Amino acid sequence: MWDSPVTFVLIAINVIVSMIGFSNPDFVNKFIFWPYRQARENQQYRFITSGFLHADWMHLFFNMFTLYFFGRLIERLFEGAGLGGKLSYLLLYFLGLIVASIPSYLKHKDNYGYRALGASGAVSAVVFASVLFSPWSTLYVYFIPMPAIIFAVLYIWYCVYMSKRGNDNINHDAHLWGSLFGLLFTIALVAALQPHLFEGIFYQLTHPRFNF
């Protein structure tokens, strides 16, 4: 816990805020992502606050379970590799929340009925940051093992496909743009602070290792 305190604080805030929202619809309505009201009432704080609300326990558990594993990894890596430490990690997380929601904001700012919530955009950014450093590490998707880089490609394809279909209540655009932001942000961070790390990243990328 002490080697990744920011991750545990983020998880704690998500749990507390989500639990309040589970039993308080007025609280949710005040802080949920709601492009229509944001555009007309300058409530841009919703880009951030909506990321700490979740629809139900399963939604909360899935996001926090993922953040627990990947967030601790990235927090320690940013610190140990000289990539800005906890400040860069917080920027990745909060900018991920904002950037992931911008396409939905532009698409739905005239749609009164559209609302969204959840940390998925930020969590996706964190996951894809880890893929850059460990492209061949094993991830388990519904108990199916696959390399992280294969998962990343399939995930992007799935988000694009489901976004075009648009027949469920999941904000696939947020997942897509959060993921892409996480990858690009981390590449830019390495380029700005520790460009020599690209040699190791390229080596890992071009030397597959499968550990199923």
Image: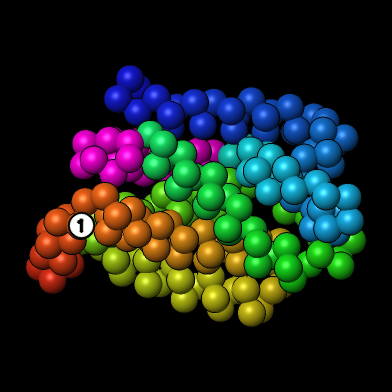
Write down the quadrant of residue 13 in the picture: top right
Q: Position of residue 195 (x, y in %)?
A: 20, 57
Q: Position of residue 142 (x, y in %)?
A: 41, 56
Between residue 149 and residue 107, name the one nearer to us: 107
The kind of secondary structure element at disc 1 is: loop
**Residue shown at 58%/46% (left/top)?**
119
Write down the quadrant of residue 191 in the picture: bottom left
The three-letter code of the residue at mark 1 reads Pro
Q: In the image, is 191 to the left or to the right of 118?
A: left
Q: In the image, is 59 to the left or to the right of 26?
A: left
Residue 196 part of the magenta-drawn span: no
User: Circle 1 sits on which residue?
Assistant: 195
Q: In which quadrant of the rendered image does the N terminus lie?
A: top left
Q: Is 4 drawn above or below residue 169 in the view shown?
A: above
**Residue shown at 73%/62% (left/top)?**
105
Q: What span is colored magenta in the figure? A: 61-85
Residue 81 part of the magenta-drawn span: yes
Between residue 151 and residue 31, name the one nearer to us: 31
Q: In which quadrant of the rendered image does the C terminus lie?
A: bottom left
Q: Position of residue 168 (x, y in %)?
A: 70, 66
**Residue shown at 16%/66% (left/top)?**
202
Q: Is residue 158 visible?
A: yes
